[in-house]
Amino acid sequence: MDTYLFLTSILVLIVSSIFYNLLKNKPSRNGLRSYPILGNLPDFIKNKNRFLQWTTEILSATTPTHTVILRVPSQPDQILTSNPLNVEYVLNTNCRNYPKGDLFHFILKDLLGDGIFNSDGEQWHSQRKIACFELNKRSLRSFVMKIVEFEILQRLIPVVNAAVEKRTILNLQDVLQRFAFDNICKVAFDFDPETLSEDGISQCIPSNFMTAFDDSANLIMNRLLEPAVFIWRVKRFLNIGKERQLKESMKVVNDFAYDIIRNRKSNQHASSSHSNDDLLSRFAEKEDRTEQFLRDVILNFVTAGRETTSSALTWFFWLLSSNPDVEFKILEEIKFIKTQKQNHTYGNSGILFDFDQLREMNYLHAAISESLRLTHLFISTHKQL
Ligand code: HEM
C-alpha cells in the first residue's frame, strides 16, 4: 500500500510539474520555450505554418551566435544557424564533413531520387562533375541564349504589351514563374510546356506537369514540418491525407518524366527534331544510364532552375520599382552597349544582346548581385552531423 501511495505521489508530482511548466514556462530571451520531456514541441506545432518567419525571429534574437538547438521528441536535435561564419564553414570551408545525410535523403527521395540535390559521396561527385563540365560549355550557353531569346520575344514581351494595351494589372511573380518554368523545361529536356502564352496572361494554362510538380514540391517540404518522421510514414502507409495527394501528384510528374525519357530513347537513332543540346541528352550520353537516373536528372534540374530564377527576377523588379535611379543607370548602360555595337546583333530579332555584350553590362550585373544579396532567395538548406 505504501509503495502504491509513493508511486502515485511521484506520478502526481511529475504530471503537475509538466502542467506547471507548460503554463508558467517563460520563453528564453530569443522567444524559444523549452518544456520538460516535450522540448520545443508546443512552439514547433504552434508555428508550423510560419516556420520560416518563426525561426528567423528566434535566430535574429539569439545574439551574438544567431544559432539555436531545436529539440522535438522523436526527431534528431536540429541546430539552426543564420550566422554567416557558420554557414561559410558548413557549406564551403568544411563541406565534406556535412553531408545531406540519410534522413533528408529519405524524406526527399520520392521527388529528388538520387539526383545531385539529394545525394552525397561518389553519387553526388560524379553528377557534379558532369554538371560543372556541361554548364560551362559554349554550346550549352548558345542553346540557353536561343531558348531565352525566344521566350522573351515570343511570350514575355507580348504578355506585358497586352497588359499595357488593355490596362490590366499583371501578377509579375506568376508571369515570371511561368517564364522560368518554360525556360528550364526547354533547357533541361527540350520540351516546351507553354505555360506562358503569346496571347496574354488570360490565355495561359499551367500544364499538368507544372501543377503536379509544384504540388509535389510543396507536399514533400511539408514532411519536414511534421513533428515526427513516423507521422508522414504512417500516412503514406495508409495512403491518406497529404501523403495520398503527394502520391497522386508524383504519379503525374513521374509519368511525364518517363514519357520524355522513353521518347528520347526511341528517337535516339532515328532523325529527330530535338537538338541533343539539352541537359538530358548530355547526361544520357553514356549508354548505361538507367531510366531512374535520367528521371532524377530531369526533376533535379527543374527544381534547381524554376523557383530560384523566378524569385530572383521577381525580387529584382520589385526592388527596381522603388529605385528609379538604379533603373535609369541600367537603361543608360544598355543604350551605351547597344550604340557601341550597333552592327553586332544576336539572333533573328536584332533586339537582344549576345553573351559577350551581356558580360559588358557591369552595372546591371552589380544590381542583380545586390538584389540577390538583399533578398536571400535561397532560404535554407539542411546538412547532417
Ligand atoms: C537565380 C537563380 C539561382 C540561384 C540563386 C541558385 C542558387 C543555388 C544555391 C544557393 C545552391 C546550393 C544549394 C545547397 O548547397 O544546398 C545551388 C545549387 C545548384 N544549382 Fe543553382 N541557383 C540558381 C539557378 C540555377 C539554375 C538555372 C540551374 C540549372 C540550370 C542551377 C543548378 C544548380 C545545381 C545543379 C546545383 C547543385 C550543386 C551541387 O549540389 O553540387 N541553379 N544553386
Image: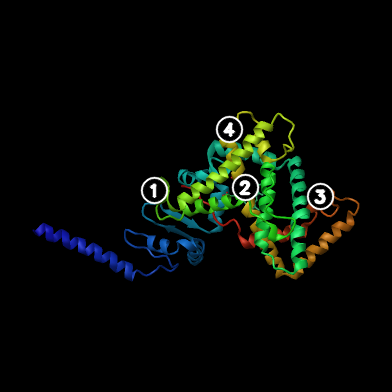
Q: In this view, does 269 lie to the left or right of 100?
A: right
Mark 3 sits on what residue? 354
State which tag comes first along the sequence, 2 or 3.
2
| Mark 4, other Cα within 10 Å: few <14 / some 14–19 / many ≥20 | few
State which tag comes first along the sequence, 4 or 3.
4
Q: Is mark 1 on a helix, strand or loop?
A: helix
Mark 2 sits on what residue? 302
Quadrant location of the N terminus in the rendered image: bottom left
Q: Is residue 77 left or right of residue 136?
A: left
State which tag comes first along the sequence, 1 or 3.
1
Alpha-carbon span between mark 2 and mark 1: 29 Å
| Mark 2, other Cα within 10 Å: few <14 / some 14–19 / many ≥20 | many
State which tag comes first along the sequence, 2 or 1.
1
Front one among 60 and 138? 138
Residue in the image at 69% along x and 45% along y: 187
The residue type indicated by label 2 comes to Val
Mark 1 sits on what residue? 234
Furthest residue to the left? 1
Residue in the image at 68% along x and 66% along y: 319
Alpha-carbon span between mark 1 and mark 3: 53 Å
Mark 4 sits on what residue? 290
Res. 129 in view: no
From the viewer's perspective, is the residue at label 4 or at label 3 nearer? 4
